Image (spheres, helix red, strand yellow):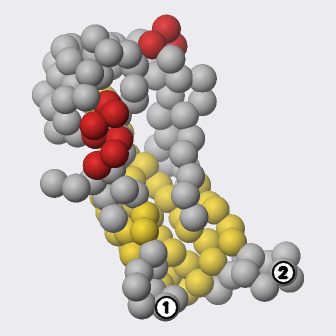
Amino acid sequence: MISSWIPFEEPAGGPTFYRFEEGTQYDLNVDNDGDAVADYTIAGSFKTRRAPRIVSPYNTGPINSLDDPNLNLKQNYTLQVIYKGNVEATVGPVATLYNNVGDPSTPSFLRQRHRYHGVQSSKRRNRPHFRGPDR
């Protein structure tokens, strides 16, 4: 399963670009056998960190990596794979990829995006695992 949520994102959408809400659990329900009951649930929760010295701007200079000091708002996520009510796998916190807010602010976005793989399936059957950014 591959997914991406970036609503209305463009450089003119700032300075408060979209992010996932803290205190909310995002569930993706997957029905594998057609009975309209979730067999798998992928549950995600998010934490936001703001640079202590900055209140408003998303960045204070070009962003070239997930840990760039110019990125003033960072989010991490934790995911769980739940199979028929039992937690099968948990990973996190993993850094989310920063917003592509235009070449002056995010000149390396396309390079970072291709290095970021998110969740991948395992070679072992029924053993999902997660993979975050390559380091």
The quarter of the picture where the C terminus appears is bottom left
Query: Which residue is pictured at 55% across the width and 58% down the height?
Result: 2
- Dot 2 and dot 1 residues touching (CB under 8 Å): no
Percent from the top left, x then y, of residue 45?
A: 47, 55
Percent from the top left, x then y, of residue 66?
A: 23, 39
Q: How many marks?
A: 2
Secondary structure category for the residue under label 2: loop
Q: Residues within 10 Å of mark 1 (few under 14, many from 20)?
A: few
**Residue, far bottom:** 125
At label 1, the amino acid type is Arg
Percent from the top left, x then y, of residue 6?
A: 54, 34
Question: Is 3 left or right of 53, judged from the image as shown?
Answer: right
Q: Which quadrant of the figure has residue 101? A: top left
Q: Which quadrant of the figure has residue 104? A: top left
Say the numbered circle drawn on residue 125.
Answer: 1
Query: Which residue is pictured at 49% across the width and 82% down the height?
Result: 87
Mark positioned earlier in the residue sequence (2 or 1): 2
Say the numbered circle drawn on residue 113.
Answer: none
Q: Residue 54, can we see it?
A: no
Q: Which quadrant of the figure has residue 106? A: top left
Q: Residues within 10 Å of mark 2 (few under 14, many from 20)?
A: few
Q: Looking at the picture, does residue 19 appear above or below residue 88? A: above
Question: Which residue, given by chain and number where applicable, does mark 2 sit on?
Answer: 34
**Viewer-side residue, 127 vs 52:** 127
**Residue, far top:** 12
Secondary structure category for the residue under label 1: loop
Q: Looking at the picture, does residue 20 appear above or below residue 40? A: above
Q: Looking at the picture, does residue 81 appear above or below residue 19? A: below
Question: Is 133 left or right of 80, judged from the image as shown?
Answer: left
The quarter of the picture where the N terminus appears is bottom right
Query: Which residue is pictured at 73% across the width and 81% down the height?
Result: 32
**Viewer-side residue, 117 vs 56:** 117
